[in-house]
Structures are given as structure tokens and as C-alpha cells.
Amino acid sequence: MGYYDELDREVDRDLGVEPEVERPHVPSRMSRMWKRLSRFVMDCGRVGAKIVFFPVIGSIRFSPRFDADGNPKETRSFVQRIAEGLATRLMLTPVVLGLFFIAIVWLTTHPTQVQARQTPHAIGLTYQTVHLQSNDGQAIQGWYIAPLTADDVLLQGEAVLTEKRPAVVLVHGLGATHDEYLPLARQLHNAGFAVLMLSLRGQGESGAGAVTFGLRERFDVLAGVNYLRDLPLVDGEKITLVGSGIGAAAVLHAAVLDRSIRAVVVDGLWPSFSAWTRQIFAQPTVPTQWLAPLYEVTFELAMRERTGELDATALVRRLHKQNVLFIVRNAPDQPPVADSLALAAATTVPHDVIVLGGGMGVGGAGHVAGTQADDGIVKFLATSMGWDGPHANVPESVRELLKAKVK
């Protein structure tokens, strides 16, 4: 307090004026909360920085200790600091890894929904957009291509409307849409099949949902099978399935659950979920395959599903008289040919194998159209159904007109 301040106080006392009492500043509740939040964020930042950029002898504790004179002091020895630093990091490592794998599982099970670039109209086919619902409440979208056209009825008469036709459900792979099967759909339509092209959950134009690599997608396939069975032109006892990548696992699961399905085509089927994840984490320069089991455990906990159910060897042994066609692609990002052939040999039902030289994306991201594969699929399904084609019972002259139309 200065000399003039003391003089002012004496004058106030002589005049009988009470001195003003300075009241301490009380911050508002919002200000206190914001200050605490700022301090918390800064503390978290410091802790995070020490986790990422830490010396081994450092400590997570960021509050220094001071002596009586206000100088910082160190009460721990060099060995204690090393022990504390290592112990702290070891305790935080599972937390960091857990958060990392939770993020990876979320990203892989919620891929960007790729929209179809073209529709069956692009290849001259009339189709109907259908909206289905699986038994677990998932909204599914698909394209239905009827086995008959107006020209067929005109050339063959109304009697053709009473003939039941075989049907097929086409299921795409991970990160793709149902338009990948358009070339095959055209061939199947020309062969007289009713075709349903499904968009799996969480992909394409179907409702948002977690991708489970075939575990829950089997319910999407069964929803498509039930839709076909209710159609008047479809023979409910002659329904077949075709799938690639995770779609292959889904159709195989569906065939195990529904024994009335007559034939299954699996393209790029991995023998197990573990084999697929090991391939995903395989890097030529960095050994990261040890992360695959951790990803598998995190996936099971997050999705509440058992990845052991994706064991393809156990599934093919549970098939009930359904014919199976294995399409094997000799490519680095595909299941090893030896494993696929061993998988085919493990089945006890009639089966066939087509080995191709082309590949797909990682994990079977898409079906690669090719004359050899598509022709083999159509022939296999027609043979499995005992189907001679849509024009087996019409006059030769009409048959020639129909052949000229579909070319």
C-alpha cells in the first residue's frame, strides 16, 4: 500500500466514511465447467503425448513435486523411473490395441456402400426392383428378372404361363454390388432361369447394416429363396444359389439351412475366417499376421458371432444331396488352389471344380465375368436341375426364332 493510499484512508476515517471492502471475483458456473473441461483436455493431450512420444524412463504422471522453497524435486531413482515407465506402458498397451482393433472392425464391417453402375436394362433385360426383409429384420434390395418375356408368350402361347421354371439367386462379394453378375444373369435368363440378383446388407442399395462375412448374410439369401418360392412361374423345388467371396460363404450357409436348395456355386470361397484374415494382414515387408487372431477375437466380441461357423470344410460336409460347383481362381489375393481343391474333396455330395487363372479383389470383392466361368455355371445348374432349356417342347421353327432373338 502506497503513501497516498494511507492518506486517503485517514481522510475517510476523519469524515466517517466506511472503506469499501473488495469482494473476491467469483467465476460463473459455465466458466468453471469450461475451465475444468479445458484442463481435462489438456491433461489427456499430455498423457497421449507421453504414451506416443515417451522416453522409457518417463512417467505418465505429469504433476511435478516441489520442495519447501518451490523448487521441483525428484524423489524416484533412475531404476524406479524405468520400472514405472515400463509398467505404465504395459498396462496401457492392451487399451490402445483394443481401441485400434475396435476401429478396424468397425471400418471393415461398415464399408462404403457402392451403388450399382448399371441395371439389367443395360443388357436388354426387363427387371423388377424388389424389397425384401430377412428374418432378423434387415432390409434387402434386389433385382428380379422373370424367365419369360412378352415375346415368349406371343410366340409360344398362353400355355407357357403354366410351366414352372428353375430359379437362381446371385449373391455378390464384399465391396461390390449386384450388377457384377449382369453377364451371367443374361446367360441364365436365356437358358430359361428366373434370376434374383441380391444386394447384401450394408452394401449396394440395401439397408445399412454390419457386414459379417456370410454369417448374417445367409438370412438375406434365404429371404431371396422364400421370395422366389412364392412366384407362380418358379418351381420351388428347383432353386439354386451362386455366390462369390463373402457371398459364397452366405450361399453355402443357406444351403445347409435349407435342404430343398438343389445346387450351389461358390466362387472364391475361403476355407476359414482365420485363413482369410491371415491373408488380409499378410504384408511382404512388415510381419503383421500376428494381428489376425486379435482382429478375429475383436470381431466376435463386437458382432456377437462365432467365426468358427465360417469353417467351410465343416459346412460342405453338412450339405444334403445338393450339387456343388467350386470355382477356383489361381491368383495371389484368392484362396490357395490347393486349399480349394482340398475343400472340394472334403464334400460328400456330387461336385465339380473349375480352375481359372484370373483373380478378384481382396477377399473376393467381385465376380470376374468370363466365358469359361459363366458357361460352366449355366451348364452345371441346368444339368443339376435336369433342365433342357425353355424351348425344348416348342416347334423347331419357333425355336429358331427364339434363338435368333436372344443372341
Image (cartoon, rainbow, N blue to C red):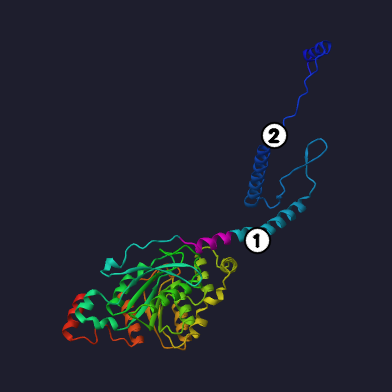
Secondary structure under tag 2 reads: loop
Q: Is residue 329 visible?
A: no
Looking at the rendered structure, the kind of residue marked 2 is Pro
Which quadrant of the figure contains the N terminus? top right
Q: Nearer the viewer, residue 109 or 32?
A: 32
Residue at 49 percent across and 67 percent down: it is: 211
Q: In the rendered structure, which disc, 2 or 1, sits on the residue that comes first in sequence?
A: 2
Q: Which mark is residue 27?
A: 2
Label 2 packing within 10 angstroms: few (<14), some (14-19), many (20+): few
Residue 236, compared with residue 60, is above or below; it is below
Q: Nearer the viewer, residue 80 or 106?
A: 106
Residue at 67 percent across and 57 percent down: it is: 92
Q: Nearer the viewer, residue 283 or 12?
A: 12
Q: Which mark is residue 3?
A: none
Q: Nearer the viewer, residue 161 or 316?
A: 161
Real-space Cα separation, disc 2 to disc 1, in angstroms: 40 Å
| The magenta stretch spans residue 103 | yes
Q: Is residue 47 visible?
A: yes
Q: What span is colored magenta in the figure?
A: 100-111
Q: Position of residue 194 (x, y in %)?
A: 33, 77
Q: Identify the image quadrant of residue 386.
A: bottom left
| The magenta stretch spans residue 248 | no
Looking at the rendered structure, the kind of residue marked 1 is Pro
Residue 18, compared with residue 360, is above or below; it is above
**Which residue, given by chain and number where applicable, does mark 1 sit on?**
94
